[in-house]
Image (cartoon, grey):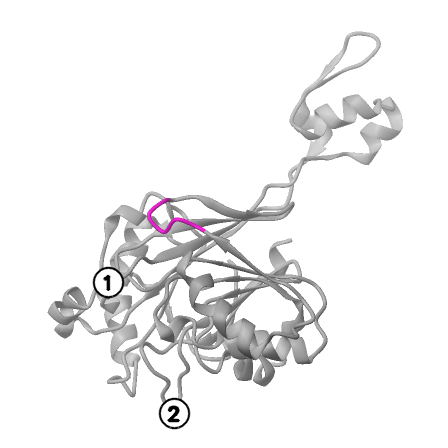
Amino acid sequence: MSKLFSVTILGSSSALPTSKRYPTAQLLNVSERFFLIDCGEGTQRQLRKYKIKFTKIDHIFISHLHGDHCFGLIGLISTLGLLGRNIPLYIHAHPDLEKILRPQLDYFCKDLPYQVIFEAFNPKDQQVIYADKNMEVETIPLRHRIPTVGFLFRQKPEERKLKKEFVFVHKPSIKEMVSIKKGGDFVDEDGKKFSNEDITLDPPQTFSYAFCTDTKYTERIVDQIKNVDVLYHEATFAKDNTKLAKKTYHSTAEQAALIAQKANAGKLLIGHFSSRYKDVSLLLDEAKQEFSNSFVANEGDVVSIP
């Protein structure tokens, strides 16, 4: 499972596109199921550029309703229709997004051959908004100028696996095998007890990914993302603009690294860079001073988790 858990960076700029960076968008691959996180302007071009089969995207998660995080939606929705999509597309977002997009859909996409289903959430609450057999997605309430959330993607643990030699010799019943997979012990006909750890194999390790943008520095997210394998945290400004970051409800690279440090994250990705930084090495250097395992989120990067 873990080999198929990765994120592709489609856009890492804040506010507006630049000649080198697009507004925020990421594509998460979990066991060959694709999830789009934010959808800034130009997202569908980036999906094509990096040869991603975006017709496989069934769920889109929108952090908040600033244009640099959602202006790409109507174009992507229209394109999927032109490509013949016939299965529903789910968009998880603030309830106002449907009010904004529905008139556009009715005008530009009235013959759309598939359903667009809006799944609204309360951005003030920490809640599970999606779950399947492999993964669940939880909102992370953030602090921005408008209601905003991050997203925590966590793989679900698999059941323990029975050792083949044990099954061959002792021939447990279906009911007993179900119990053993869930952690139970086994007692044979003679009353001999076999501990679970002796008759099963450990399941594959599970991993997690936290996406946190846009937000000012806030330690209240630390407990929720504790021990996350990979943390993406906005780093809009360098630390000489700490006052501006606070005023605009954004973070510095140093602050992103402090959150990673306090959360004991395995790896930190910084992004959402202000267009004033033509070279973001300054931001990376600042992050590394506080959290050595820091990296820049560049367009086209495919980051394995962990």
Q: Residue furthest bottom?
A: 19
Is 107 displayed left or right of 289 in the figure?
Answer: right
Is 299 displayed left or right of 194 in the figure?
Answer: left
Q: Residue at x 47, y 77 (%)?
A: 72
Question: Residue 160's spot in the image, x, y percent?
Answer: 68, 35
Q: Identify the disc placed on residue 19.
A: 2
Question: Residue 136's spot in the image, x, y percent?
Answer: 54, 47
The answer to whether the residues at label 2 and label 1 have Cβ atoms under 8 Å apart is: no
Is 90 displayed left or right of 222 in the figure?
Answer: right
Q: Identify the disc placed on residue 229.
A: none
Question: Residue 228's spot in the image, x, y percent?
Answer: 42, 51
Q: Nearer the viewer, mark 2 or mark 1?
A: 1
Question: Residue 223's spot in the image, x, y percent?
Answer: 33, 43
Q: Residue at x 38, y 53 (%)?
A: 265
Residues 72 and 224: in front is 72
Extent of the magenta region: 121-125
Q: Residue furthest top?
A: 191
- Counting residues from the start of the chain, the first of labels 2 and 1 encountered is 2
Q: Which element type, helix, strand or loop, lies under badge 2?
A: loop
Q: Is residue 52 visible?
A: no
**Residue 284 among those drawn in magenta:** no
Magenta stretch prevailing secondary structure: loop
Between the C-alphas of marks 2 and 1, the distance is: 27 Å
Which residue is label 1 attached to? 145
Q: Residue at x 65, y 53 (%)?
A: 1
- Badge 1 density bin: few <14, some 14–19, many ≥20, Cα 10 Å: some
Q: Which element type, helix, strand or loop, lies under badge 1?
A: loop
Q: Is residue 187 visible?
A: yes
Image: 300 above or below 183: below
Q: Quadrant of residue 111?
A: bottom right
